[in-house]
């Protein structure tokens, strides 16, 4: 659940996330950070930070200051597309019945040097389904994990990895702008989740700038800020994997701090 607040109910109209870490032959790593919404809520790190500050509870009331929130919304209107989408869609009925989007654009480069801009998403084989109005009233605040476990008891959950192929003029550096729906798409892989549970992911910063060979980031300022904004990962409980991450070497690529595996 987006927002970093453990008490947020699963019925809230906010994004669901999916973090993936691929360990490739030779020890290379590729990571993805995805949301179930088609656009992001900020076009710049400044806008994102301002909105986070505006959402902090006022010490006097214990709730965010609506005047402050309205001021930020007026100064940074880049959140409107996401707000409109969330207002029109109810929360997904299950983690397994949501599609997850890259939001940012990446360039796939062949060995000969030619490249193509793409975005990707994972489309559930179970189909996409939102909660009904009556379900929202009765399902309770913590249904996502037990529903996923119940589904996995019947067998693995599958998603198709679909690439959307960009065309000249498509925005590459603004994640609040969706590409036209008529863009060509191709299915290139399948994600299988066979079990859930454990804490192995707690120490991982699912940094979407940790990329495998042949995939390059765009100049999207929100994407390029992701590696430097890894403070939350350092605040998570320490386990064997997080210790390994902290032992990793840091290197600088395109001015961004990335983690490399041991």
Image (spheres, rainbow, N blue to C red):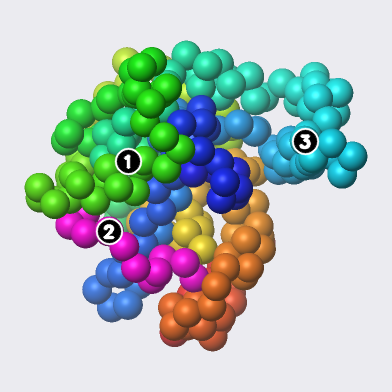
* Residue neighbourhood size for the residue with mark 1, other residues' Cα within 10 Å, grouped as few (<14), some (14–19), many (≥20): many
Residue at image coords 10%, 47%: 154
Q: Position of residue 180 (x, y in %)?
A: 41, 17
Residue sitting nearer the eye, 209 or 155: 155
Determine whether label 1 and label 2 are within 8 Å by CB: no
Specify the farthest residue to the right: 60
Magenta segment boundaries in residue numbering: 190-203
Is label 1 in a helix, a strand or a loop? helix
Give the image location of residue 197, x and y in percent. Answer: 31, 62
Q: Name the disc covering residue 196, or none.
A: 2
Residue under label 1, please give it: 95
**Label 1 vs label 2: CA separation?**
11 Å
Q: Is residue 20 visible?
A: yes
Q: Which residue is mark 3?
A: 63
Q: Give the secondary structure at mark 3.
A: loop
Q: How many marks?
A: 3
Q: Residues within 10 Å of mark 3 (few under 14, many from 20)?
A: few
């Amino acid at each position: 659940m987006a927002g970093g607040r453990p008490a947020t109910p699963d019925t809230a109209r906010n994004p669901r996330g999916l973090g993936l870490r691929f360990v490739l032959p030779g020890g290379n790593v590729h990571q993805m950070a995805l949301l179930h919404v088609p656009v992001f809520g900020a076009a710049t790190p400044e806008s994102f930070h301002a909105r986070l500050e505006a959402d902090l509870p006022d010490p006097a009331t214990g709730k965010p200051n609506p005047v402050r929130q309205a001021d930020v919304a007026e100064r940074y209107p880049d959140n409107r597309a996401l707000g409109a989408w969330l207002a029109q869609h109810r929360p997904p009925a299950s983690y397994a019945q949501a599609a997850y989007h890259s939001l940012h654009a990446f360039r796939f480069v062949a060995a000969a040097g030619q490249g193509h801009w793409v975005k990707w998403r994972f489309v559930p084989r179970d189909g996409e389904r939102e909660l009904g109005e009556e379900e929202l009233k009765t399902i309770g605040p913590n249904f996502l994990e037990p529903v996923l476990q119940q589904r996995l008891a019947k067998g693995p959950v599958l998603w198709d990895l679909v690439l959307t192929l960009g065309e000249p003029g498509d925005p590459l550096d603004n994640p609040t702008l969706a590409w036209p729906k008529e863009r060509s798409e191709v299915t290139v892989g399948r994600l299988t989740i066979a079990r859930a549970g454990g804490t192995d992911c707690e120490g991982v910063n699912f940094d979407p700038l940790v990329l495998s060979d042949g995939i390059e980031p765009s100049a999207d300022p929100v994407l390029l800020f992701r590696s430097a904004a890894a403070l939350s990962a350092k605040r998570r409980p320490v386990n064997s994997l997080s210790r390994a991450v902290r032992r990793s070497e840091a290197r600088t690529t395109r001015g961004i701090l990335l983690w490399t595996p041991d």
